[in-house]
Image (cartoon, rainbow, N blue to C red):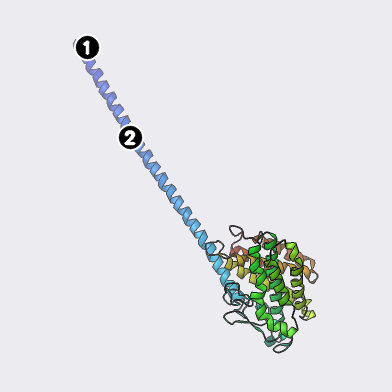
Amino acid sequence: MVKVANMVTMTAAKVVKAANMVTMTAAKVVKAANMVTMTAAKVVKAANMVTMTAAKVVKAANMVTMTAAKVVKAANMGHHDGGEGGEGGEHGHHDGGEGGEGGEGGADPYAVFSYLNASAGGEGGEGGEGGEGGEGGEGGEAGHAIDVTNPGVYATNLAMMKGHLTVARELYEEGEQTAAQPHFGHPIHEIYEPMEPAFEARGVDDVEPALEALIAETREGGEWGSHTGAYEAAFDAIDGALQTVDADLLGDVRFQSRVQLALLRQAMAEYDEAIGEDGKFVNVLEYQDSFGFVQTAKELLEQHADLYDDETRETLLDAYDQTLTAWPSAVAPETPVMTPGELSASLFKLEATLGEY
């Protein structure tokens, strides 16, 4: 019996020992579970930190984009010398107000024609004050003047008229007749008044009636084909006004290159105005104006292709095609294809090449 009792005692001790081992194992399991929980918490914390970091990166990227747009805006204002006025835009965004176009906040795309100013010993507007070019025109509600005695300023404003009409036609053909109407009116409402002294001095009297006739016709609606006659008559009148510029200048590669430059710089100012700091469109009219100006600049290159050597001409045409991807059509997309900074970078090749003349 004693032997049996001892065996029972030993067995009970083993059971207790086994129970203790189970308890220790359970404690280790709990400890391991706690470690897993702590590790999971650390993973969650790390994931949150990554998310926060990613958000900071996105915020930083947005700030860089906004800063780039501001730099472009400042550069445009700076390298135009703040000169003589220019395109005013329909809401007076630019110094030109309702008359004459000249970039945002006094920026002057016409600075590229300073070599033609009378004070610089240039053409002096082909007659200077009181001469063939007239005395200049008032450029907008703030009274800023554009020097329409300067043949480069005169030719560029005629080209801007074409740019407005070009985008108006495209909108109309795309079924956006209401959106097209302001652009049919822009040559009269934004450009004609400051140009009037030059028109009078040069004996040009058919531009205004041709533009007014086009506005009246397109307001009636209908198929675009019924308005092509009035549209072509307006272009013919503008081309006729351009022919009053000295023929030597019209055939000069430097002059033609600088008209393109002025158009491109004005387009950049318009595009910058079209997009807000949040990267969204705030003024589609400016988007459309800029589209018309770049198209017109390219058309000028094509019209005067023989002034450029083959390599330069192809370089410019390729650069124009690349830049024009910013405008998939005259109708603004839901979001801009390019930021102002990206458009400025795209324009660099054009400006650098044209600026060599």
- Classed neighbour count for the residue bearing mark 2: other residues with Cα under 10 Å, few (<14), some (14–19), many (≥20): few
Is 287 or 113 nearer to us in this picture? 287
Label 2: which residue? Answer: 30
Q: CB atoms at circles 2 and 1 under 8 Å apart?
A: no
Residue at x 64% of width, y 72% of height: 266
Secondary structure of the residue carrying tag 2 is helix
Is 106 or 21 nearer to us in this picture? 106
- The answer to whether residue 289 is left or right of residue 25 is right
Residue at x 66% of width, y 71% of height: 185
Q: Which mark lies nearer to you, 2 or 1?
A: 2
Task: Measure the C-alpha gap from mark 2 to mark 1.
Answer: 38 Å
Please, is residue 227 above or below residue 100 in the view?
A: above
**Furthest-front residue in this view:** 220
- Classed neighbour count for the residue bearing mark 1: other residues with Cα under 10 Å, few (<14), some (14–19), many (≥20): few
Question: Residue 192: x percent and y percent?
Answer: 67, 78
**Furthest-bottom residue in this view:** 130
Secondary structure of the residue carrying tag 1 is helix
Q: Is residue 142 visible?
A: yes
- The answer to whether residue 205 is left or right of residue 45 is right
Q: Amino acid at mark 1?
A: Val
Question: Residue 194: x percent and y percent?
Answer: 65, 80
Question: Residue 10: x percent and y percent?
Answer: 24, 18
Q: Picture quarter containing residue 326? A: bottom right
Question: Residue 133: x percent and y percent?
Answer: 72, 85
Label 1: which residue? Answer: 4
Q: Is residue 355 visible?
A: no
Which label's residue is closer to the chain start, 2 or 1? 1
Q: Quadrant of the C terminus?
A: bottom right
